[in-house]
Amino acid sequence: MSPKIKAAPTVSPDVTTATGTGNIAKTTALAKAFRLVEITILFSTGTNNNIVITLDALAGVAYDTVLKTIVPGGATSVAWTPEKDVVYAKGDEIKVAWTNDAAYTYGLRIVTEEV
């Protein structure tokens, strides 16, 4: 059975970005219902530190959930597209965290689509 290919966004996507040389601790500030389209990160040097993508639920910390832990294995870039099309409620946000222990430079993109 062939994998299901998700349709392209029907409206302009929202892109949350961050760049720097410190740790990644980025949370979206969407304040609207959305679907998560993709997260990409480019590092100046390969990293072995885990990247943790979490739902920061409006309903409170009891509902915050790790959506994905990425183990880069020395990669200089990572991309994650959720396997399922999930709609998040207005007020939910996406957090991306990564520990930078070697002064790498990074560029992060969190792509969402309003629903």
Image: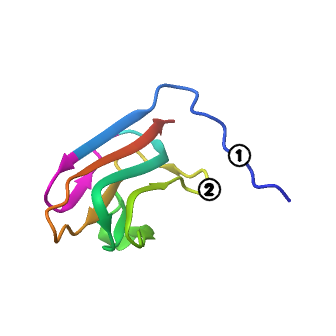
96 horizontally vs 66: left or right: left
- Which amino acid lies under the numbered mark 1 shown in the image of this protein? Ile
- Residue 5 marker: 1
Asked if the magenta segment contains residue 95, the reply would be no
Q: Position of residue 42 (x, y in %)?
A: 34, 51
Q: Position of residue 99 (x, y in %)?
A: 22, 69
Q: Position of residue 110 (x, y in %)?
A: 37, 46
Q: Nearer the viewer, residue 82 or 114?
A: 82
Q: Position of residue 112 (x, y in %)?
A: 44, 41
- In this rendering, which labeled residue sits more in front, label 1 or label 2? 1
Residue at point 60%, 50% (across, down)? 85
Res. 64 visible in picture: no
Residue at point 21%, 59% (across, down)? 25
The residue segment tinted magenta is: 19-31
Q: Nearer the viewer, residue 22 or 4?
A: 22
Outermost right residue? 1
Q: Where 76 falls versus 10 (above or below)? A: below
Which residue is labeled 2 in the image? Answer: 84
Res. 50 visible in picture: yes
Q: Nearer the viewer, residue 86 or 41?
A: 41
Residue at point 76%, 55% (across, down)? 3
Outermost front residue? 45
